[in-house]
Amino acid sequence: MNPPLSAIREHVELFTVFDSNPTILLVDAADLNRRVVKATLRETGARFIEARRTSEAFEILRKERVDLVICDLFLPDENGMDFCRELKADRNTQLLPVLMLTSLQGSEHEVAGLTSGADEYLLLPAHPNVLKARVLSMLRHKAAIDSLDEVESILFTLAQAVEERDRCTSEHCRRLSYFSVELGIRLGLTRNELMALHRGGYLHDIGKIGIPDAILNKQGELTEEEWYVMRSHVLRGEDICRPMKSLANVLPIIRHHHEKWDGTGYPDHLKGTKIPLLARILQIADVFDALSSERSYKKALTMEEACRQLEREAAAGWRDPELVPLFVKMLEEGDEGEKMARNLRAMSLGIEGNRPSFGLGMGL
Ligand SMILES: [Fe+2]
């Protein structure tokens, strides 16, 4: 299923050429060097913004969309390597390619430059064709990352649209993501695993996009055939997200978030620890949020009531009997605001409204 998303992906792969007017930030104290670089790269059609020092460069980066940074190793207020490290440590600029252009000879400097985060290192005087080729290659790579980021944004927006259709509130995704990550932190999960939980909070039910309204919003019991269709959302969701390599570790969450500890869940009837840990974590948060939220057909349970119900479900063999007590303890310790802040800091994520940031290209 899902021809629209496949089509989007194909187009992204076909059209990963950079914007006809990319913006290059030149950071170099020497006017002559900046003039030479601009003259060499004139044919690229790039727009140039110039900075003599890193403080100016950071100011520009706060205001302007930049596609490539070309910087010298020697700058008046900070050396180029420290500048590079700062760029790569900042979530807003970490995917920005950096070309270090310097007259400092020696392989040790090249290694140090690349280790500091520079994507390319070229010695001056650089052959004009070599400089042009490197810059064009870096701009193409940046365009590809931007395009993939757009596809991820579309997926997440779509997932929220599904939530709104299904549960009348997109806040569910946000809470689910938060509770899952918080529990993940307590379990000492890695940053990659936390990021998968964060994304899984938004994407776990994306497969419901293929479920007809008549089934999704049916008042009353579903027939056996309708349940069959409804259960297919986990496989549909996996299909939708599979093409995105950056979502590889979210796929088990999407596929297995309805498995049950005793093997009576779906789609694979996995039992116990055979169910991927991240899926078990997300499921507990999902069940808790469903219990404690109001629906058209039921009132919201209080936090205490929802916790007791979760404990009953663990005792009945449906939920992970070790994770449920940890989750309940986490909720009962309170101070949600502080935990939310810690949660976001732990992942270096930003959340604007309900939209998560995706961290594409971070090897996640
Ligand atoms: Fe689901």
Image (cartoon, grey):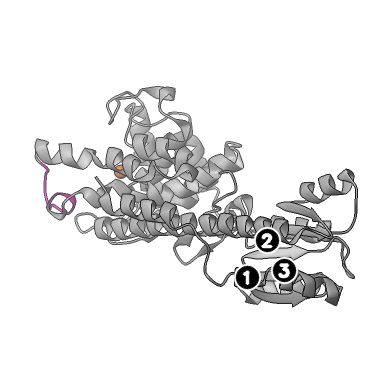
Which amino acid is tagged 1?
Answer: Glu
Q: What span is in magenta?
A: 215-222
Q: Which residue is pictured at 67% across the width and 61% down the height?
A: 132
Between discs 3 and 2, the one toward the N terminus: 3
Residue 40's disc is 3
- For this view, does 308 lie left or right of residue 212? right
Q: CA distance from mark 3 to mark 2?
A: 7 Å
Is residue 260 something that shows in the picture? yes
At numbered mark 2, what does the secondary structure look like: helix, strand or loop? Answer: helix
Q: Circle 3: is it few (<14), some (14-19), or many (20+) Cα within 10 Å?
A: some
At numbered mark 1, what does the secondary structure look like: helix, strand or loop? Answer: helix
- For this view, does 7 lie left or right of residue 297? right
Q: Which residue is pictured at 28% across the width and 61% down the height?
A: 168
Quadrant for ligand 1 reads top left
Q: CA distance from mark 2 to mark 1?
A: 9 Å
Work out whether residue 61 or residue 73 is closer to the camera in this orientation and state it.
73
Q: Which residue is pictured at 78% across the width and 75% down the height?
A: 35
| Circles 3 and 2: CB atoms closer than 8 Å | yes
At numbered mark 3, what does the secondary structure look like: helix, strand or loop? Answer: helix
Residue 132's disc is 2
Residue 43's disc is 1
* Quadrant holding the N terminus: top left
Q: Is the residue indicated by label 3 positioned so its CB lies within 8 Å of ligand 1?
A: no
Q: Is the residue indicated by label 2 positioned so its CB lies within 8 Å of ligand 1?
A: no
Against 222, residue 268 (above or below) is above
Residue 30 location, quadrant: bottom right
Work out whether residue 69 or residue 310 is closer to the camera in this orientation and state it.
69
Against 248, residue 261 (above or below) is above
Q: Which residue is pictured at 67% across the width and 55% down the height?
A: 134
